[in-house]
């Protein structure tokens, strides 16, 4: 056991830190606040720079264009990116979910076709799992795919699909056998979002940003070879996606939380609406110190779970712990900011506290306990699949 | 970075588990806890033979043993001797401990004087002259099981042979009967000044807190295991109670608290062993996470058991009381959060 970087890790961290500082430039490093919402052009340009420098897919196998590095390197990458507040890669869903699922289940042709443009950020992915009638109960998905010659014909509707409005591809859960027992009737398709019959309608979130969408599929024809796994294996393939979503995500979320903690410390040290310095208030000090403890505990829990990931390549269901605790910690952090800002918290643009940064962060955090498995579902998973209690359903 | 224990450390864990499961099943713990002595004095020799008292062991080996002894609630002054006093022993005491002959505790608190180890020498009314010591110390852990006590006086640390001066020991009734507290009444009692000075207390405190956090992780793990096995079997309204989310989500929350506490306790143990700059903060973080986490785990487990969880007969309250002991030692979570705040909000 040694919590420090090895010599190689320290070298990687040092090189990366210098690269981030020079590439983002002094204006970025010294800017007073971090932007709230997502900026597509900025994110795409940044993704290309990351890719060219070899920082995308660090831990992916070399044969698929990855860096073949141990998982700790991805942890270091995320920590350093968060430290400087670097923009997010545009292909979060591709890199974190679609890619690893294709690596686990794809044929050689599929890996060749999809992985390279996914890494370079040329092709953006979205996730089409949730439907109006089936969110937590994903196994009840109704979107139909029927084989017609060499093509699957897809009809149905997905909802809450993040980034679908900028996506080129979709990982789609469909029902191919309506007669089979519910989970066994599902299959997993890789669908070109530019196909005729695909219609994306953005939905505004409570932040006001249209970050997720409805997707309507009307007689969309998908080549037969665009299925991941066999017909009827969709549930198992989707589980791989969800384990990655919750497991690997834990790392980036925790890195982001470190950034937020630094921000709240900054906020607490400046005079509040009443002219008082919140950081002098023992109650606020207690709350911030607890957030610090939660952050450290999440970091080391993530790192400890790498041992399993390094061995099996798939994160264990313990990944749910990180997602669950991160989401609730982030909500506590942002609601503390709301309390500190008083009525000025209402001002969500110019004239507001940090031009509305905290208003955005706080509202966005309410989605954290819903997306990628609600907190209730994650507690069910921990009880049933980790601790081994009998199934509640 | 490497976040796993070594193969040797895992081997040590396996052998500790075997020994503890074999010698200290729940019924035996109950019997010893309710006995006058509070332990089986043969245990010390067994621990020596198993290598638990070996001065060569490092903080990570201690971490493993502390976690396992918390899981079993091992009734022996192992933590007091190794965790609390390990950094203060002189060669005479160290050899005696290694041989399985001496058991040591630390006396720092006074009724109208210091209550915490960090400030133990300030305002202490305990003083030494001509090879004797005078003063009254309270809340001395495992006092009834110790052969020697290291006493914090206003000008240094002194070893008192309490085995040879039994009249100095008054045991008090405590809720945790597997780690009792006593009063040490010294009046012109022979004492030997130790090489370690008052400044060594900071190290002793850090080690003690780090190991106690690991012990709390063992306590929390046991509380979770008890809750899991009970809620998998017990039926009400024709259903296994573990299928009710009001019950199962308590179990999940316990699991989460345990995982976080474990990460923090291991970090603290590592930071102490490596002399890391973060050691003080890591230890405070572990105190918060594992100290409060173990209390939480026991409370959730008691609730999930219903009436049987509220009985003296059931083993759970023994763990609950230990969790409270550990949480109360050397500053509450609130105090450690205040220390962390001083660092991060400086
Ligand atoms: C910001 C955001 C981004 C998202 N992005 C995507 C995306 O890209 N792709 C995608 O496919 N989906 C996405 N989702 C959808 C998300 O996965 C679902 O919203 C989520 O799974 C819950 O499903 P639902 O909305 O149908 O709510 P429901 O499943 O109807 O849940 C309603 C309430 O009931 C509770 N509940 C349901 N079942 C149980 C149970 N068995 N036990 C206890 N409580 C239960 C839930 O916890 C919740 O509190 C996103 C959601 C959000 C908020």
Image (cartoon, coloured by chain):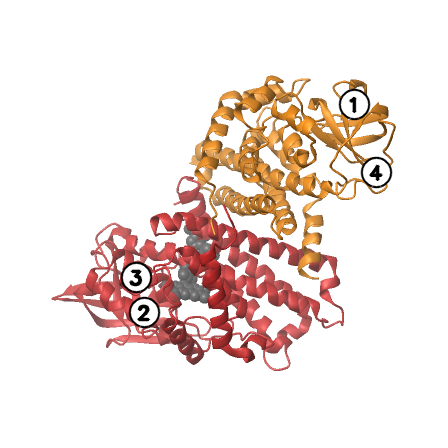
Chain colours: A red, B orange
Q: CA distance from mark 3 to mark 4?
A: 64 Å
Does A209 sit above or below residue B204? below
- Is residue A266 shown left or right of residue A314? right
Which-is-in-front pick, marks 1 and 4? 4
Mark in the foreground, 4 or 2:
4
Residue, disc 1: B170
Q: Are marks 3 and 1 on the same chain?
A: no
Tell me residue A50's x, y (percent): 40, 72
Q: Residues within 10 Å of mark 4 (few under 14, many from 20)?
A: some
Q: Position of residue B151 (x, y in %)?
A: 78, 32
Task: Give the labeled residue for mark 2.
Answer: A118
For mark 2, name the chain.
A
Q: Looking at the picture, do discs 2 and 3 lie on one chain?
A: yes
Q: Which residue is mark 3?
A: A62
Callout 1 and callout 4 share a chain: yes
User: Gap in Å between the C-alphas at discs 1 and 4?
Assistant: 25 Å
Which residue is label 4 attached to? B155
The answer to whether mark 4 is within 8 Å of ligand 1 is no
Badge 3 sits on which subunit?
A
**Of discs 3 and 1, which sits in the foreground?**
3
What mark, if any, has residue B229 been given in the picture?
none
Q: Chain of mark 1?
A: B
What residue is shown at x 58% (from left), y 72% (from top)? A359
Give the percent coordinates (x, y) of residue A310.
38, 50
Q: Is residue A146 above or below residue B72?
A: below
On screen, residue B12 versus residue A283, left or right, reads left
Q: Is mark 1 within 8 Å of ligand 1?
A: no
Say whether mark 2 and mark 4 are on the same chain.
Answer: no
């Amino acid at each position: 056991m040694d919590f420090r970087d090895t010599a190689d890790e320290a070298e990687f961290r040092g090189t990366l830190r210098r690269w981030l500082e020079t590439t983002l430039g002094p204006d970025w490093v010294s800017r007073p606040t971090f932007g709230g919402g997502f900026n597509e052009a900025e994110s795409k340009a940044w993704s290309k720079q990351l890719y060219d420098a070899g920082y995308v897919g660090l831990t992916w196998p070399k044969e698929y264009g990855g860096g073949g590095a141990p998982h700790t390197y991805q942890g270091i990458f995320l920590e350093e990116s968060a430290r400087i507040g670097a923009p997010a890669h545009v292909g979060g869903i591709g890199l974190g979910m679609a890619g690893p699922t294709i690596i686990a289940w794809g044929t050689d042709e599929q890996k060749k076709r999809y992985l390279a443009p996914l890494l370079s950020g040329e092709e953006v992915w979205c996730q089409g799992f949730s439907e109006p009638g089936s969110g937590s109960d994903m196994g009840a998905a109704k979107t139909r795919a029927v084989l017609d010659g060499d093509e699957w014909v897809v009809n149905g509707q997905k909802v809450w699909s993040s980034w679908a409005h900028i996506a080129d591809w979709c990982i789609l859960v469909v029902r191919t056998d309506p007669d089979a027992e519910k989970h066994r009737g599902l299959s997993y398709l890789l669908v070109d979002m530019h196909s005729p019959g695909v219609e994306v309608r953005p939905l505004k979130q409570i932040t006001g940003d249209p970050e997720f969408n409805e997707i309507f599929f009307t007689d969309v024809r998908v080549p037969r070879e665009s299925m991941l796994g066999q017909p009827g294996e969709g549930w198992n393939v989707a589980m791989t996606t969800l384990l990655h979503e919750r497991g690997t995500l834990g790392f980036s979320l925790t890195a982001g939380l470190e950034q937020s903690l630094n921000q709240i410390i900054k906020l607490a040290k400046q005079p509040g609406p009443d002219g008082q310095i919140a950081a002098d208030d023992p109650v606020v000090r207690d709350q911030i110190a607890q957030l610090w403890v939660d952050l450290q505990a999440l970091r080391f829990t993530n790192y400890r779970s790498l041992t399993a990931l390094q061995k099996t390549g798939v994160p264990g269901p313990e990944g749910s712990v990180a997602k669950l605790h991160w989401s609730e910690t982030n909500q506590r952090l942002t609601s503390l900011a709301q309390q500190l800002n008083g009525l000025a918290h209402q001002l969500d643009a110019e004239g507001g506290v940090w031009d509305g940064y905290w208003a955005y962060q706080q509202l966005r955090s309410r989605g954290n306990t819903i997306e990628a498995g609600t907190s209730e579902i994650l507690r069910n998973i921990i009880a049933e699949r980790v601790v081994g209690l009998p199934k509640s359903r | 970075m490497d976040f796993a224990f070594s193969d040797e450390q895992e081997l040590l864990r396996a052998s500790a588990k075997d020994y503890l499961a074999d010698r200290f099943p729940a019924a035996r713990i109950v019997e010893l806890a309710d006995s006058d002595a509070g332990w089986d004095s043969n245990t010390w020799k067994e621990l020596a033979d198993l290598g638990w008292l070996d001065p060569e062991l490092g903080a990570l080996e201690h971490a493993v043993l502390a976690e396992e002894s918390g899981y079993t609630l091992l009734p022996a002054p192992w933590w007091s001797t190794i965790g609390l006093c390990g950094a203060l022993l002189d060669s005479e005491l160290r050899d005696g401990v290694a041989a399985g002959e001496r058991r040591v505790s630390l006396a720092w608190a006074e009724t109208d004087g210091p209550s915490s180890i960090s400030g133990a020498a300030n305002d202490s009314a305990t003083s030494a002259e001509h090879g004797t010591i005078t003063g009254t110390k309270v809340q001395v852990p495992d006092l009834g099981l110790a052969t020697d006590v290291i006493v914090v006086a206003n000008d240094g640390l002194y070893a008192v042979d309490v085995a040879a001066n039994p009249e100095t020991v008054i045991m008090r009734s405590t809720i945790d009967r597997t780690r009792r507290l006593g009063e040490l009444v010294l009046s012109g009692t022979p004492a030997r000044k130790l090489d370690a000075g008052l400044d060594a207390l900071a190290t002793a405190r850090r080690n003690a807190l780090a190991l106690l956090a690991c012990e709390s992780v063992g306590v929390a793990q046991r509380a979770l295991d008890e809750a899991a096995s009970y809620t998998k079997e017990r039926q009400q309204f024709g259903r296994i109670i573990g299928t009710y989310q009001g019950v199962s989500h308590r179990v999940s929350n316990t699991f989460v608290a345990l995982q976080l506490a474990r990460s923090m306790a291991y970090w603290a143990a590592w930071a102490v062993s490596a002399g890391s700059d973060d050691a003080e903060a890591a230890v405070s973080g572990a105190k918060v996470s594992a100290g409060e986490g173990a209390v939480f785990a026991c409370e959730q487990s008691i609730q999930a058991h219903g009436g049987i969880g509220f009985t003296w007969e059931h083993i759970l309250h023994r763990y609950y009381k230990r969790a409270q002991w550990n949480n109360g030692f050397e500053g509450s979570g609130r105090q450690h959060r205040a220390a962390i705040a001083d660092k991060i909000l400086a």
